[in-house]
Structures are given as C-alpha cells and as structure tokens.
Image (tube, rainbow, N blue to C red):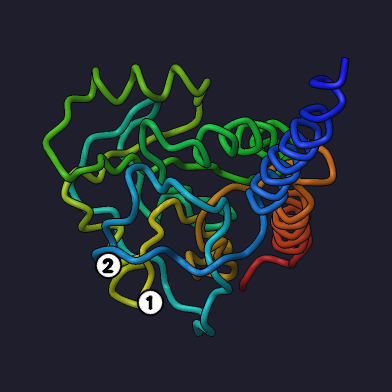
Amino acid sequence: MNRLRIFGPPLAMAALIVVALITLAVVRSCAPAPAAAGARGEPRAADAGPSHAAALPSLDPRPAPEWGERPWLHTAPLSWSALRGHPVLVRFWTDGCPYCARTAPALSALERRYGPRGLVVIGVYHPKPRRAVTVEEVERYASALSMSFPVTIDADWSLLRRYWLDHVDSEWTSVSFLMDGEGIIRHVHPGGEFHSGGGPEHAACNESFEEMERRIEALLAAPPES
C-alpha cells in the first residue's frame, strides 16, 4: 500500500501532463500559426502541421488565372467565359492532406446549399511531390473524399503558382479562392481547413467557414454586372 501511495501522485501528475499536451495540440489544430520552416511552396508532407496558415497578406482583387489545357473530372473542360455570372469557389487539394480531407465535406455542403443559386465549386488536385498523375488516379482520390463537383489536375503546380505562390511567400498550398461572377478573386482562405462543427477546439475552422458563407451569400445577392 505504501508503494501505491508513493508512486500514485507522480503517475497521476504524468497523466495530467499528457492530457494537457494532447489538449493543447488539438486546440492549436485550427488556430492561425506561422508556416514551419521548409522550401517555399513545398511544405511539410501534405501540409502537415497546424491546421491554418498565417494571416493572409493584403492582396488586391485580381482576375483569376485562365485554366489552360488540363484534364477535368466530372465535367467538360471549363473556361472563365463559360463560368461568367457564377460565383466560383476553387480549392487546391491533394491526397494524404488531413486539412483537405476535413474541408472536403464543407465544399460539398456549400455546393449543395448554394449550387442551385449559381455557385460553382471546383477542386484543383496538385500532387505532392509534383509528378505526373493519371485521371484514374485522381478520380480515386476524389471519390475517397466524396468530391462529385468538377475537379481539374495541376500536376506541375503551374496553376497554383499563378494563383498563389507567385504572389505570396507561403509554404501552404491547400488554399481556397472565391471569385465573383466576373472571375475576379474576392476572398482567399490561405491554407488549412474550414468547416462547421468539431467542437470548441475547431472554433477557428468554424469562423473561416462562416466567413466563406458570408462572402458567398454577398456575391449571390449582388446585382449582375451590366
């Protein structure tokens, strides 16, 4: 009994420390944080680490880059002229990315909610590391995340560079862009995840999702350009 009394408190203290560390890690999972050290544009494998990128630097509204020649899934090839009049939400994602996996249901929910009113959701798959991929391979990855909306492939990251990496010094690539009906970028989520739910530890994720919803609602309510 004496041995139990002697070793009990240290064991309990160790357990409390472990729980505290786990709780801290979970709370940080959706909190804004600086990107970890590494090569620019080549972050930790599949954007591992904190679930949000650092605050976005000020970017003036600008036209979204043209898509160029690339494979498409779930749709015929799209162009900005064909998308004119529609708000468009573009999400760069990859396989093995936990933030992409946790955001995918939110993208599908936004498409279901706002698609009938004109929103178009597009996923842009970019492999890590950069490599040639087949449409069949990307279809498997998209299916695993229940992505039924249009998906295109950016195997060499050329689209990602024109959208993002050429404009900011960021290691994050799981980035989302919201365009208005004229194809002008109006809102950027600078990397990581956004979604509803998940409890208090996902408050930042929820705030980002609510901000995205507000931006979408505003674009859908805006009168069309003459």
Q: Position of residue 55 (x, y in %)?
A: 58, 73
Depth check: give the residue in front, 9 or 188: 9
Q: Quadrant of the C terminus?
A: bottom right
Residue 175 shows in this picture: yes
Q: Position of residue 172 (x, y in %)?
A: 41, 59
Point out which mark residue 89 bears: none
Q: Is residue 164 left or right of residue 129?
A: right
Judged by depth in the image, the label closer to the viewer, 2 or 1, is 2
Q: Residues within 10 Å of mark 1 (few under 14, many from 20)?
A: some
Residue 220 shows in this picture: no
Specify the amino acid type for callout 1. Val
Q: Is residue 166 above or below residue 139?
A: below
SS of the residue under disc 1: loop
Q: Is residue 13 above or below residue 174?
A: above
Specify the amino acid type for callout 2. Arg
Which residue is the site of mark 1?
A: 168
Q: Quadrant of the N terminus?
A: top right
Q: Residue at x 33, y 20 (%)?
A: 139
Q: Position of residue 120 (x, y in %)?
A: 55, 43
Which residue is the site of mark 2?
A: 40
Depth check: give the residue in front, 87 or 56: 56
Q: Earlier in the sequence, mark 2 or mark 1?
A: 2
Q: Residue furthest front?
A: 2
Depth check: give the residue in front, 114 or 110: 110
Give yes or no for contact between labels 2 and 1 (Cβ–Cβ under 8 Å): no
